[in-house]
Amino acid sequence: MLSIDNLQNTFKKKISELQLLGQPPELYEPIRYAMELGGKRMRPLLTMLACDMFGCDVQKSMDAAIGIELFHNFTLLHDDIMDQAPLRRGQETVHKRWNANRAILSGDTMFAMANRHMILTPPLCQTQVLDIFNRTAIEVCEGQQLDMNFETRQEVSVPEYLEMIRLKTAVLLAASLQIGALIAGASSADAQLLYECGMCLGLAFQLTDDLLDVYGNESTFGKMTGGDIIANKKTYLYLRALERASPEQRTLLIKLFSDTPDNPDEKINDVKGIFDALEVRVLTKQAIDCYFDLAMSHLKAIGLPESDTNVLKDYAASLMQRQV
């Protein structure tokens, strides 16, 4: 089994070799900028990890890994426009550095580039991989639309929210693992178990993001903390708070999440005060642990020796250790 460092270095080298030059340069500059921002490269690493886990040369999964990373970054470009986010990975978002029109067009180009890389997967699994990839792309868009719908709905249930983040975030992690396994020749049953593992990891990962948005360190989180509160996003923390709130707390929360504040810091502090009083930080951590444990149970059910799954297990655990 290859180490995470080895896989990261291999992928970093491949990304640096990508030909992101072209005419007109105004189209390709934002693409280069977005890809050079780096990030965890979590999704391509999962694809490569799954491939390596089943004893296959990770180079066979490289085009799929690159395609998945291009697609993920395309979604970030468009999401940042919709959210009017000023920061991504601690740097200006593409639409802030240039403008929304260039960000949209460069993002569209990245999606097309992603599909070109996915087409280069091995012929034996190409049709299956392309079907998974395009189904996942549709699901991610469905999740984004649900997220936008929730912004104008006063009532959103916790199950509805979990379904939204399953689509918007978790399905891509799940597909990354499944695609890597299929490229390596894994059985459909084992590939499906990895898909379920990735789904639970994705849910745990997004709930961790929700927690970090309120309680994280901005310099390590890479995004403005309190951004979800300012944007009136109905996150897991907010919805669990509503479930536990007294009538007075519920009225105040709904009012806080209906206003555009003159003083954003004051709004963030008021919301955090209610969250703290209702112990939603503890509840969210419990949900994260539950999904992580479920992910590990799916991984354990795969027909491989434990020594072959330890790298993925350790990597998954490291994703849950971000500073809160």
Image (spheres, helix red, strand yellow):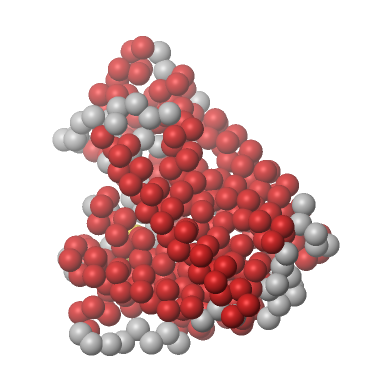
Q: Is residue 320 visible?
A: no
| Residue 255 in the image, given as x and y percentages of width and height | 25, 24
Question: Can you name the residue that lies furthest to the right here?
Answer: 305
| Left or right of residue 100: residue 20 | right
Q: Residue at x 69, y 61 (%)?
A: 188
Left or right? Give the position of 298 relative to 246: right
**Residue 23, x across and y down, in percent:** 23, 87
Above or below, 63 relative to 157: below
Q: Quadrant of residue 138?
A: bottom left
Q: Residue at x 47, y 59 (%)?
A: 135
Residue 217 location, x and y as percent?
43, 49
Which residue is found at the position 34% from the left and 29% from the top?
271
**Depth check, front residue: 209 or 27:** 27
In this rendering, the count of numbered labels is: 0
137 is higher (above) or lower (below) than 276: below
In the displayed structure, 130 sits above or below 29; it is above
| x, y percent for residue 14 | 50, 83
Nearest the eye: 153 or 253: 153
Is residue 185 toward the left or the right of residue 46 in the image?
A: right
Q: Is residue 198 visible?
A: yes
Q: Quadrant of the N terminus?
A: bottom right
| Residue positioned 50% across, 26% down in the render | 279
Snapshot quadrant of residue 228: top left
The outermost residue toward the top is 247
